[in-house]
């Protein structure tokens, strides 16, 4: 049986390479340990604490309450507007009813054309007044509703200014009027409204009305009312526009 002879190979290492190799191995071990350490630390830092959902729930509740409050405020505003509109409609109906009651009052049933007492209401600024003037047909006749009246109404305010008598026409006091007289065209009645501004120092005492009819016949209708009478009439609500 043949024998195998083992050969021994001897490697000679340079005296410098052996310490370098050993140092490299040690350095690699240190680097590996450092990487493992920092990786573990980073993984621990990357773990977030448990999420608290109660904050989201609270925020959601706040938004819901704010929305509910906004909706309630809007609904309340709409309700107030609706009530104001309803009240306005009622006031308008009451004004219309009061006006027609005045037109049909027993003292208004005389024949011919009548000039009702002016109605004056104090405005929002000193010296400002809201006025209402009404011309109407009198008592019922066979021709009622068939006659159309046309004419011009002149209004004069008499009073005292700095201790002396003074008068102003309606066109002097109403900034919206350009003519000296109001044109009137009516079958049953007509109302004219506007605003006057009394001059500083002028104290009104009476109001004179002069209606000069040209149709159906030429006729003059004159009336005079004290300023106090006009203020007393202001307790009657202003009527809506009508002819």
Image (cartoon, rainbow, N blue to C red):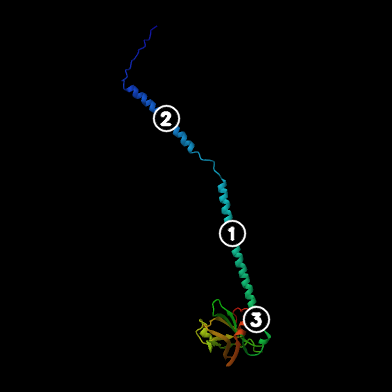
Classify 11 as above or below 194: above
Lower position in the chain sequence, tag 1 or tag 2: 2
Residue 89 location, quadrant: bottom right
Q: Which residue occupies the foreground of this view, 39 or 6?
A: 39
Instruction: Determine which residue is flagged by label 2.
Output: 32
Q: How much space separates mark 3 and mark 1, taking CA atoms?
A: 44 Å
Q: Residues within 10 Å of mark 1 (few under 14, many from 20)?
A: few
Q: Residues within 10 Å of mark 2 (few under 14, many from 20)?
A: few
Q: Position of residue 34 (x, y in %)?
A: 42, 31
Q: Position of residue 54 (x, y in %)?
A: 57, 46
Q: Position of residue 33 (x, y in %)?
A: 43, 29
Instruction: Determine which residue is flagged by label 3.
Output: 100
Judge depth for marks 3 and 2 and give the one in front: 2
Instruction: Determine which residue is flagged by label 1.
Output: 71
Secondary structure type for disc 1: helix
Q: Which residue occupies the foreground of this view, 72 or 242?
A: 72
């Amino acid at each position: 049986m043949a024998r195998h002879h083992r050969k021994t190979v001897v490697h000679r290492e340079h005296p410098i390479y052996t310490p370098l190799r050993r140092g490299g191995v040690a350095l690699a071990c240190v680097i590996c340990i450092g990487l493992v350490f920092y990786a573990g630390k980073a993984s621990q830092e990357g773990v977030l604490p448990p999420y608290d959902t109660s904050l989201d729930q609270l925020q959601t509740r706040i938004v819901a309450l704010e929305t509910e409050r906004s909706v309630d405020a809007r609904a309340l505003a709409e309700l107030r507007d609706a009530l104001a509109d309803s009240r306005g409609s009622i006031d308008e109906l009451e004004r219309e009813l009061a006006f027609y009651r005045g037109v049909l009052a027993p003292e208004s049933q005389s024949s011919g054309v009548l000039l009702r007492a002016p109605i004056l209401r104090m405005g929002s600024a000193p010296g400002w007044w809201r006025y209402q003037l009404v011309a109407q047909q009198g008592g019922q006749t066979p021709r009622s509703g068939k006659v159309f009246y046309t004419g011009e109404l002149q209004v004069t305010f008499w009073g005292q200014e700095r201790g002396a008598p003074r008068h102003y026409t309606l066109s002097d006091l109403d900034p919206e009027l350009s003519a000296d007289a109001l044109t009137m065209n009516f079958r049953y009645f007509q109302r004219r409204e506007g605003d006057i501004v009394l001059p500083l120092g002028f104290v009104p005492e009476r109001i004179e009305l002069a209606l000069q009819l040209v149709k159906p016949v030429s006729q003059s209708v004159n009336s005079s009312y004290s300023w106090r009478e006009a203020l007393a009439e202001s307790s009657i609500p202003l009527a809506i526009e009508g002819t």
